[in-house]
Amino acid sequence: MDILIIFPPAGFPSGNRGTATQWAGLLEKLGHHVRLAETYSGEDADLLIALHATSGRPALVEFAKAHPDRMTIVALTGTDLYPALSSESLASLELADRLVALHPKAYESIPEELHDKLHVIVQSAAYHPANAPDPDPGFFQVCVVGHLREIKDPMRAAAASRLVPRESRLRVRHAGRILEKEFAEMVEREEAENSRYRYLGELRPDETQAVIASSRLLVLSSRSEGGARVLGEALVAGTPVLATRNQAAEGLLHEDYPGLFEFGETKQLASLMTRAETEPAFFETLMKRTQSLAAQFDPAREREAWHQLLDELKTGAAEREVTPRTGTA
C-alpha cells in the first residue's frame, strides 16, 4: 500500500512529527511504502493519514475531492480532543473513513455515532538498556520530560519540590525545549532559588532515555495529553509515573492508579513524591503497577494493531464504489 502521512508543520522536533516518523517506520516494516509531508500537494496514494483533525483538514478535503475512491484516516491529537472537539475537527472526523486515537478514553470525547470508526492504537516505546544508568543512590531523582509550554504545566514538579521535607534527598531534573518565552525567566529564577531543581535543556533521544531510566519517578503534569509518548517510555524503562488525572493518563494507567493527582495541585504532587521517597510499600506498589502496565507499549502490539486496521481498510476499499463521502467537505 502507498501511504501518505500529513502532519502539522513545526520548526522544532514536535510530538506530532515524532509520531509521524514512528508510524512511518512501523508501516514500512509491514511492507508499505510511506511518504511524510507537512502539506498536501495533490499527490495520489492508496491511503492518506492526517495527523491532527484541525490542521490536517485541508489535506483531507483536497485528497477526498481528488481521489474519492481512496481511503483516509484521521489521527486524533490532544489539541483535537481537548478541551473539546471544534466544529472543524468534527467535520474531519465525519469525513474520514477511520479514526485513530492513542488511548482508550478518547471514546468519551467523540460523538457516539463515530465510535465504530475509532481504533485505539497505543503508541509503543522501546527500552534501550545500554542508555540506562542506575539511579544515583545519593539522591531521589524525579524527572520531567517535555517541551515547556503552558498546557504542560512544566514547572509543577519544581514547585512541589519546594514543599518536601527539608531532609528529603529529592531533586528534579527537567529536559525539554523552552517553547513559550515566559518559561525562560521561570527556569532561571527556579534554578537560582531552588537547589533541588536543575534544567537540562533539550536533549537527544538517547540522553532523554538515560535521564528517565536513572530517575526514581517521572512527573507528567499536563492539563491534557493526546497519548503521552513519554509515559510509555518511562514505564518500559521501569520508572514509575506521577501524572495529572486527565483522560490520557486514566486511559493508559487506569483510573485507580495510585500515582494520579489533580491538575495544578502542587501539594498533592509534593505528597506523592514524599510518599514515594519515604514509604517503601507505596513505592513498591508504584513499581508493580509500572511493570504490569508496560506490556501495552510493546512495539509488536502497535504493529499488529496497525496491521489489522490496514487489512480492514483494504477490504473496505475493495468493496467501495466511487460515491460521495459522508460528512461535509
Image: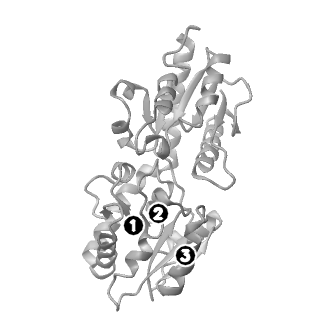
What amino acid is found at the position of numbered circle 3 in the picture? Answer: Val
Say which residue label 1 marks.
240
Mark 1 element type: loop
User: Which colour style is shown?
Assistant: one colour
CB contact under 8 Å: marks 2 and 1: yes
Q: Position of residue 317 (x, y in %)?
A: 56, 16
What amino acid is found at the position of numbered circle 1 in the picture? Answer: Pro
Mark 3 element type: helix
Mark 2 element type: helix
The label shown at residue 187 is: 3
Q: Position of residue 2 (x, y in %)?
A: 68, 28
Quadrant in the rendering for residue 239: bottom left
The tag earlier along the polypeptide, 3 or 2, is 3
Q: Is residue 182 placed above or below 78 in the rendered structure?
A: below
Comparing 213 with 191, the one in front is: 191
The residue at 62%/26% (across/down) is 47
The residue at 50%/43% (across/down) is 77
User: What separation in Å lies between label 2 and label 1 (alpha carbons)?
Assistant: 7 Å
Comparing 237 with 273, the one in front is: 273
Q: Specify few, some or many for label 3: CA neighbours under 10 Å numbering under 14, 14-19, or 20 or more.
A: many
The residue at 60%/61% (across/down) is 179
Quarter occupied by the C terminus: top right
User: What separation in Å lies between label 3 and label 2 (alpha carbons)?
Assistant: 23 Å
Q: Is residue 91 placed above or below 195 in the rendered structure?
A: above
Q: Position of residue 100 (x, y in %)?
A: 48, 35
